[in-house]
Amino acid sequence: MRLIVSFLFFFILNATCAQHTNSMSEEEYAILRHKIRTNFNANTDSSLVYANQMAKSNSNKHLAFANAALSVLWQNKGKTELSKEKYKTALYYLDKVPDSKDKIQLRSYIYNYGGLAEFDRRNFSAAIEKFQQGIKLSQKIGDINQLVNFKANIVLANEVVGNYKLAIKNGKELDNFLHENKDLFDKESFLNKKSNINLSLGGSYEDYFKANKSKRYLLDSAEYYYKKTVDYSDNYLFNKITAKLNLGNVYNWKGNLKDAEKAYYQVVLLCEENDQKELLCSANFNLGDVCYTQKKYDKALFFYKNTDSLAILSNSNELDYLKSNYYQSKIYTILKKPELAYEHSKIYLDSKKKYEEKLKKERSDVNELQGVDSQTEEMIAVEQNYKKDLFLDKSLKGFYIFLIIGTVTLLVKSNRDKNKANKKMSAIIQELKADIEKENGSFAKVKLLESIKTENASLCIDLAKENEIVEKLLELENNLEYLNTGFTLAYVAKKIKTNTTYLSYVVNKRFGKSFGEYTNELKINYAINKMITSETYRKKSTQATAESVGFKNAGSFAKSFRKRTGVSPAQFANNI
């Protein structure tokens, strides 16, 4: 009897152990990998399920990929330490994989996920470094598919750090590269990449406009690329909804509220059908914004309340929640309901404090926070007015004074803490902002542009000729000919078979600057991009950097560089 019991015990133990050892086939691995990637942006939770399922495999290759994917997915959830741990685990299992072409490809996948995780942490230089390493590996084994992914990520990084022109230029080059290699992709992969590239280009143009709101023609380009994204995204729901939401924003910027409202309603419908809470929250806020602009306050309140409910559920729409309560407070002030106005102003102020703390902790974009500073003063005024009315109604003068003193004390302390934290920020950001404001407000610059336009007003070139000159200029840009010291007005005019007067006129008309400013900007942007993406390039002397982009001496290069960035080349490199 003991023998039978022992046999059964070992049989059950063996069966249990066998269940924990998952011998996953390559076909199953490929299916899970596809599911992880498909749900990556649209549904993080689903991707986590599939990645954890793959992590049960006993294959080192499968474990390396699964942990690399988990490193990004956990970072998306804000779990930085767990994300870093998973990335180290991925490299650990990668080292156990035998050397082969497959291992090189797997390493490129891991670098891509590592770069995306760094990107989410706002460590852009670290992200670009990993993307650059991945590009070398992909080129080594001829993996065009992954090469496109890396280049697309670098385009996005340039957009985020404000290099909009470079992001647009590189995005268009990538789109052409994709077309040239179209036969190497299956239909689904090709459409996916076209969708991502066009969405990125639309975002670059829209963000470029936000930084230069006088250049309203940029909105036309943003609209064009968002519409193309929709066309390419029938099978990529997240991109399709995002593009439609951004189209609504473009229409809103243009003052076309009818089309903006229509686009937002389409987004709401798609989000509700596909359980996309984050995008649904943003769409409701934007609908509230449209109604508020039209003074349809009851309707606006309906959408703002939806925004609040969805923001609490999604736990990632802090800014929508913040601004929603700001506008609700304004509406209740207009409707003469001070109690409700006070209630929402208090929610706004409390939420803003938490939002600021989160931004500081994550070292997020400072400009995003500055967008709500003026609103804070208004909400404090609402809160104070309500308290004043409360005092008059209930004769609580002593309590009111105590409350005001306490509020002021807290605000002063909060401002001191904020100023103390801001001192730690790089001086280069403050200088750059000051220079941009100074440049934007420069009356002399405006007069100079006006004089140039007046001077050339008598010229008349047909549109076809203008377009031909611009196309030839862009071709020279693509060939990096502007890096030559001899790239002068006379040289270029001769090169593209026109005269200097016509060339100068077209550059001024199309680019809003003189030919010298145009060429200097190309050279400086190239140097900036190389500094961001190449550690070796950052170590060059100012003279060597100047020569590499076609400046004859370091002095003129440094002067142009400082004019563009607000700091010297050496300071810029050190800051990176």
Image (cartoon, grey):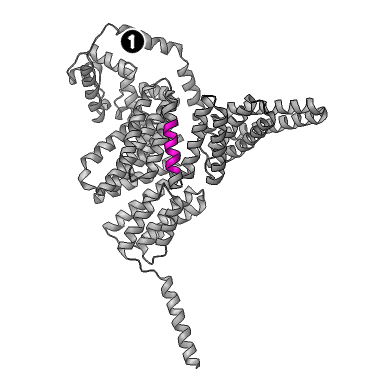
Q: Looking at the image, is 493 positioned above or below residue 46?
A: above
**Which residue shows up at 43% across the image and 11% down it?**
444
Q: Name the residue tied to disc 1.
A: 453
Range of residues picked out in magenta: 261-271
Q: Quadrant of residue 87?
A: bottom left
Residue 210 in sight in this render: no
- Relative to 67, is 402 on the left or the right? right
Tell me where residue 176 appears, x and y as whole percent: 24, 36
Q: Within 10 Å of the Cα at label 1, are there few (<14), some (14-19), or many (20+) other Cα atoms?
A: some
Camera-side residue: 545 or 190? 190
- Relative to 157, is 465 on the left or the right? left
267 in the magenta segment: yes
Q: Looking at the image, is 193 positioned above or below residue 448?
A: below
Residue 470 in sight in this render: yes
Q: Quadrant of residue 174?
A: top left
Instruction: Give the residue type at disc 1.
Output: Lys
* Outermost residue, bottom side: 1
Q: Looking at the image, is 54 positioned above or below residue 493?
A: below
Q: Looking at the image, is 441 positioned above or below residue 81?
A: above
Tell me where residue 1 appears, x and y as whole percent: 50, 93
Tell me where residue 396 appears, x and y as whole percent: 81, 29
Magenta stretch: helix, strand or loop mostly: helix
**Which residue shows up at 33% across the image and 22% down it?**
520
Camera-side residue: 515 or 330? 330
- Relative to 308, is 219 on the left or the right? left
On the rendered image, what quadrant is the C terminus found in?
top left
**Which residue shows up at 46% across the image and 85% down it?**
8
Tell me where residue 85 appears, x and y as whole percent: 48, 56
370 in the magenta segment: no
Camera-side residue: 258 or 13? 258
Secondary structure of residue under mark 1:
helix
